[in-house]
Image (spheres, grey):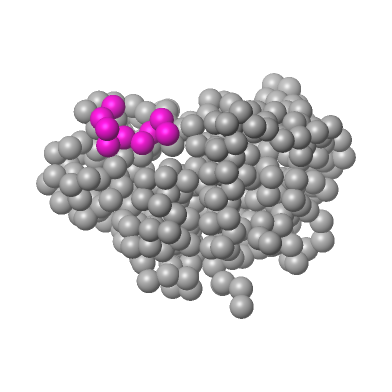
Amino acid sequence: MASTCLRFAFRRPRPRALRSALSIDARWLQTAAAPAARPGPRHFLSIADLSAHELVALVRAAQRAKDAVKAGNSVASLAGKTVAMMFSKRSTRTRISTEGAVVHLGGHPMFLGKEDIQLGVNESLFDTSKVISSMASAMVARVGPHQDIVDLAGASSVPVINALSNAYHPMQAIADMLTIAEVYGLSNLKGLKVAWVGDVNNVLYDLSLACAKLDINISVATPMGYTFDPTVLKLVRQCYNDLTAAAINIFHEPEAAVENADIIVTDTWVSMGQEEEKLQRLKDFDGFQVTDELATNGGAKRDWRFMHCLPRKLEEVSDDVFYSPRSLVFQEAENRLYAAIATLEAFVVNNGKILG
């Protein structure tokens, strides 16, 4: 029986004015289509779109891709195909990894920034998706509202892959799982503990779903007033209940979250579009910087490791941690390339068939 933590649907969007910009619409959790859920291509909009076995398979595929790249081997499985990269937000790692992945697979990456096309500006997302999907073999979209990528996928005749929305960041989660697996072994993930110290955001949401599917405990510490979206939390807890004996726990004290942690993770406190909130956020996150002192006082494991998806600011993590042997940040960043290769192989080359 399929896990109830996989939910897939496309629905007609409400007018934007009726949707809060400060919370996640519950419909956004019903993200992409499993092969039997609707006719047409299978899309990848969140880790919620994968079974636990599929996530493991993608992590293994990412490791194979890494081995192949290191050995100087490439394949031409996307030869003669164009992948449209539609980015309404600037990017470093996502753009380089996605373009590199398409090239590694022998395809042509076509970068389309917000100044290049009418992405939801003078043309509806429905029309844009219809047109681009008639000329490209896949769309990789980096957007603002998650509903934008849901709408693109709903009208597309080719696979749509989420390269970031304000709700989810699935390829980052695959890279994170690969990074953790490289340190601990893919067969040894069960029972590990990840501690997230910082803001609630798209990276946390897909990381939490990935941890749930791979039997990894996660504890989250955020300041008062920075709340893990209750609808996403319900979905994450449903995954834990369905699949594992591990759990998610929420705190407002970073020391409580890092107790017995194997891995401590943080991310930016001021995301794109939140610049006007910077001064207030810096006050709110006082005491949340990841330091050796925090880890010691909170009782993290002696050999704890550190992760951050980048870009990083000093207030988020001390130099002593960020540039220490504990830090996996540059390995994690490099793994974005192999996560992208695995994703494109699975959803574009193999038409969404990940297992078997």
Q: Residue at the spot x=25%, y=52% of the render?
A: 261
**In x, y percent, where is residue 134?**
87, 40
| Main SS category, magenta section | loop
Q: Residue at the spot x=38%, y=33% of the render?
A: 329
The furthest residue to the bottom: 1
Q: Residue at the spot x=31%, y=35% of the render?
A: 327
Closest to the observer, 340 or 94:
340
Above-or-below relation of 315 to 260: above
**In x, y percent, where is residue 259?**
20, 54
Instruction: Tell me where the magenta segment starts and ends, as one range.
Output: 323-331
Q: Image check: 228 left or right of 50?
A: left
Q: Image check: 276 left or right of 324?
A: right
The furthest residue to the front: 71
Q: Is residue 107 visible?
A: yes
Q: Quadrant of the C terminus?
A: bottom right
Q: Image check: 252 left or right of 89?
A: left
**In x, y percent, where is residue 138?**
76, 40
Q: Quadrant of the N terminus?
A: bottom right
Closest to the observer, 299 or 19:
299
The furthest residue to the top: 115
Closest to the observer, 89 or 55:
55
Q: How many marks?
A: 0
Residue 66 part of the magenta segment: no
Q: Quadrant of residue 319?
A: top left
Q: Residue at the spot x=74%, y=62% of the render?
A: 35
Residue 327 part of the magenta segment: yes
**In x, y percent, where is residue 74?**
68, 33
Q: Is residue 163 visible?
A: no
Q: Image check: 299 left or right of 66?
A: left
